[in-house]
Image (spheres, grey):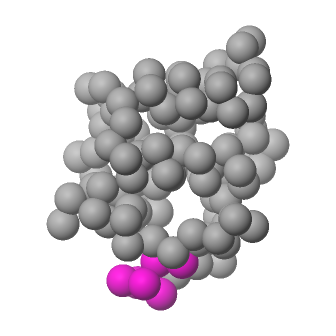
Amino acid sequence: MSAVSRLQDLALSESGFVFDPSSGATYTANRTGLLIIYALREGLSRSAVVARLRQNFRCPGADLESDVGEFSRLLVQQGLLPPEFSLDGEAPAQTAQVAQTGQAGVAAERT
């Protein structure tokens, strides 16, 4: 199963509820996290995801490049993307730590 098809299977709500029907796991994501998931579903590159974030949230000074990378590593860590997944050649971190809610508005947690 490809990374995009795995993300396509997720049930997403506007309130940030994320349900993985293959595992039964549920997660929460804020608006930024949801936007990243939707963009990854479309197969967008890191630069296109960053451009979409800048357009939607009007945050020109934010370090969105690293935030997108961090969130994609979190999705890998949670098993929502395959371990070999990368954006623009970035290798996923082997021991990535779970993003905390306060970090640049990108968060997801398994419930």
Q: Examine the rendered structure and indicate whether residue 25 appears above or below residue 10.
A: below
Q: For this view, does 92 lie left or right of residue 63?
A: left
Taking the spot 49% from the left edge, 51% from the top edge, the residue there is: 38
Taking the spot 49% from the left edge, 32% from the top edge, the residue there is: 49
Corner quadrant of residue 12: bottom right
One can see residue 66 in this view: no
Taking the spot 37% from the left edge, 65% from the top edge, the residue there is: 8
Q: Examine the rendered structure and indicate whether residue 104 appears above or below residue 61.
A: below
Residue 54 located within the stretch drawn in magenta: no
Q: Position of residue 16 (x, y in %)?
A: 69, 65
Q: Position of residue 109 (x, y in %)?
A: 65, 64
Of 11 and 25, the residue lying toward us: 11
The single residue placed furthest to the left in the displayed view is 1
Q: Position of residue 99 (x, y in %)?
A: 64, 47
Q: For this view, does 51 lie left or right of residue 58?
A: left
Q: For this view, does 88 lie left or right of residue 18?
A: left
Tell me the quarter of the image containing the C terminus. Answer: bottom right
Taking the spot 44% from the left edge, 26% from the top edge, the residue there is: 48
The single residue placed furthest to the top in the displayed view is 61
Q: Examine the rendered structure and indicate whether residue 24 appears above or below residue 47.
A: below
How many numbered marks have been drawn onto this rendered protein structure?
Answer: 0
Corner quadrant of residue 102: top right
Of 62 and 43, the residue lying toward us: 43
Tell me the chief SS of the magenta region.
loop
The single residue placed furthest to the right in the displayed view is 102
Q: For this view, does 66 lie left or right of residue 20?
A: right
One can see residue 103 in this view: yes
Residue 23 located within the stretch drawn in magenta: yes
Q: Position of residue 78 (x, y in %)?
A: 46, 63
Residue stretch in magenta: 19-24
